[in-house]
Amino acid sequence: MAKKKRRLRHTRTQPGAAPGTLVSAPERGEGRLHVVHYGPEGVVEEHGPSLERVRQLREKSGTLWLDVTGLGDAELVGRVGELFGLHPLALEDVLHVHQRAKVEDYGSHYYFVARVVNPGEMLDTEQLSLFFGERFVVTFQERAGDPFEPVREGIRAGRGRLRSLGADYLAYRLLDAAFDPYFPQVERIALRLDTIEEELLAQPRRGHMQELFRLRRELLALRRAAWPLRDALQNLLRASDGKISPETLPYLRDAQDHAVQALDMVENERELATGLIELHLAAQSQRMNEVMKVLTIISTIFIPLTFVVGVYGMNFDPEAGPWSMPELKSPYGYAACLAAMAAIALSSWWWFRHRGWIGRESEQ
């Protein structure tokens, strides 16, 4: 039996605390840094650098990407914010996970929140907080493991436009990489729904209903993540005001189209899941009706037979008078009674079949 997933407690500031107060949550893991700097001089990539080393790379020409994994150290998040001039309210949202996808313009930088879908047989999401401004991108992730390795490989190899365009294009590539796992998850659920549909038409079973409700909950979680993400990308395109290069804008519009496409797929699969639940309930109701029909027919056939044996079970004395029970002393009375009962049963069965209540006509 699968273990029930425990719901994590959301970290919140105390009532009355000043806006922008950062609260540590040790259960969310120790913060680890990974920095990538690329420019005309080449690519520098370091695991676990100090903030002083990050400051030195920040002062060089080129684009810097700092990735922070683990949100258990509020002090580290605050120091990163001071280094890049990030807004305190945005840093507070970084630590308060389960934020709705959104984009905020703080003048010198943008703050983007999205839900990242982790690969696997069970739906698992986490919050991605992304800041980008002039020549820098900062990402905060809840835990290790991300879909960004292809972006790192592209930076190392110098493929595509990553090394030639600025931080806004890097931010687009990271958002696009974070959104790509949505499609395999939707396709996985779609394939399972197709299989369940075939099984429901062939032979429904009890486990189908539980699985359908689980898949519908996963689709609802995907919808909650994809719907605001589409709006956030649209708001980012509207609020760019020249801060995003013209070369990057077409790619952001393409990312928005992907969000709309994924949302449409989620909506279609949700409707299919709801339809399959209704189909399962209808199949169970039809099966119950078939069982009740068979039991009703059997009861209807045995009602006159029960009446006959009940009458002959009263044991009247045939010598008491001419109106007493006949054939009690007849040598063929028992056989005649059984024959009459068989005739009643057969005639009842023939009538039900003639009316189409049983047999091939009822199956059609």
Image (cartoon, grey):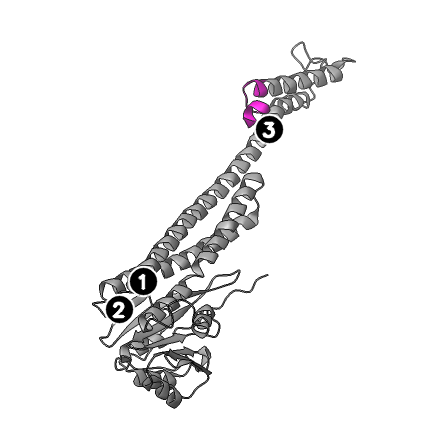
Q: What residue is disc 3 on?
A: 299
Residue that protrudes farthest toward the bottom in the picture:
52
Residue at the spot 38% in from the left edge and 88% down from the top edge: 51
- Mark 2 or mark 3: which is in front? 2
Q: How many marks?
A: 3
* Residue type, numbered disc 3: Ser
Return the x and y of residue 181 as percentages of the image width and height. Answer: 45, 61
Q: Residues within 10 Å of mark 2 (few under 14, many from 20)?
A: some
Instruction: Quote the CA–CA distance across marks 2 and 3.
Output: 79 Å
Residue at the spot 36% in from the left edge and 57% down from the top edge: 259
Instruction: Quote the CA–CA distance across marks 3 and 1.
Output: 70 Å
* Residue type, numbered disc 1: Leu
Q: Which residues are magenta?
A: 351-364
Please say if the residues under marks 1 and 2 sit with CB atoms less than 8 Å apart.
Answer: yes
Q: Is residue 246 magenta?
A: no
Residue 46 vertical placement versus 210 (above, below): below
Residue at the spot 31% in from the left edge and 70% down from the top edge: 168
Q: Earlier in the sequence, mark 1 or mark 2?
A: 2
Q: Is residue 310 left or right of residue 228?
A: right
Q: What residue is disc 2 on?
A: 244
Return the x and y of residue 195 as percentages of the image width and height. Answer: 54, 46
Q: Residues within 10 Å of mark 3 (few under 14, many from 20)?
A: few
Q: Earlier in the sequence, mark 3 or mark 1?
A: 1
Q: Earlier in the sequence, mark 2 or mark 3?
A: 2
Q: What residue is disc 1 on?
A: 252
* Residue type, numbered disc 2: Ile
Judged from the image, the secondary structure of the residue bearing numbered disc 2 is loop
Judged from the image, the secondary structure of the residue bearing numbered disc 3 is helix
Look at the image and tell me whether residue 147 can be seen. no
